[in-house]
Amino acid sequence: MKVAEIYKSVQGEGLLTGTPSVFVRASGCNLRCWFCDTPFTSWQPEGTDYAVDEIVAEIEEWDCQHVVLTGGEPMLFAELIPLAESLRASGRHITVETAGTLFLPVECDLMSISPKLSSSGPDAEQFPHWHRRHERQRFQPEVIAQLLEQHDYQLKFVIDHAGEIEEVEEFLSHFSGIQGDRVLLMPQGTTLEELQPRSAWLEPICIEHGWTFCPRKQIEWFGPVRGT
């Protein structure tokens, strides 16, 4: 499994915001979002190949019960299955962060699904190959339905502009029984200057729809730096 970084920090996004966690960041992604905040796992992937037992050994260096398996796209790696099994066997809480385009029968306590909306793709003129590939793969309803059925979940949408709210509603209409408080809307941005104006109009929209507003607290706490 190619890993870009393993580190301990505090979860800054989602239902477990504020929870001390060890993050295992897989390197490699089948999508190319223009706003990707970890380009070292997608556009310019870097990292080291780890065996599962090597990853577990690094995680065990910290006295931390929560582990986040993220990326990139961790579902690209079959090693995710034995890794999650091993960590859960030791009593750890596992979150898997995925775009919901690939399925693996992985064990976890929280499946954090971040579906990509139509505006997420790279520029069609500058990156024609990746634009086509991204658009072809970004929405896989059968995969998402499996993940929702088999796991405790959160659906986390990155929102760049208000026009995307209608697309979120259209997305949700494909699935039944989704809990509103499990639908998280997060402003697009990697600096406070970008996040604050979007947060100002996005939070009231979440309240209106019965969704959860998801601030990117790690930006507030640490800034846009790796290892946080």
Image (cartoon, rainbow, N blue to C red):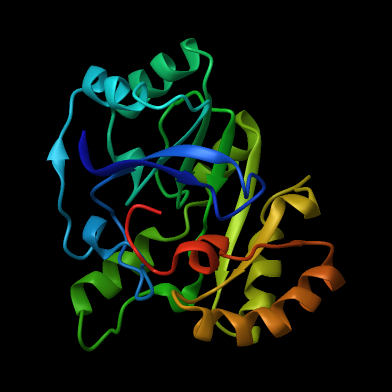
Res 163 visible: no
What is the residue that sits farthest to the top in this orientation?
89
User: Residue at left 37%, top 74%?
Assistant: 121
Residue 95, compared with residue 52, is above or below; it is below
**Position of residue 215 measured from the top left corner of the image (x, y, whole percent):** 63, 66
Q: Nearer the viewer, residue 85 or 20?
A: 20
Name the quadrant of the C terminus. Answer: bottom left
Res 87 visible: yes
User: Residue at left 45%, top 26%?
Assistant: 106
User: Residue at left 28%, top 84%?
Assistant: 124
**Position of residue 196 measured from the top left corner of the image (x, y, whole percent):** 61, 82
Q: Quadrant of residue 53?
A: top left
**Position of residue 167 measured from the top left corner of the image (x, y, whole percent):** 63, 73
User: Residue at left 51%, top 60%?
Assistant: 218
Residue 166, compared with residue 8, is above or below; it is below
Residue 20, compared with residue 132, is above or below; it is above
Q: Nearer the viewer, residue 8 or 148?
A: 8
**Position of residue 1 measured from the top left corner of the image (x, y, whole percent):** 21, 33
Q: Quadrant of residue 61?
A: top left
Q: Nearer the viewer, residue 215 or 99?
A: 215
Q: Is residue 114 left or right of residue 27?
A: right
Number of numbered markers: 0
Q: Is residue 130 left or right of residue 157?
A: left
Residue 227, compared with residue 134, is above or below; it is above
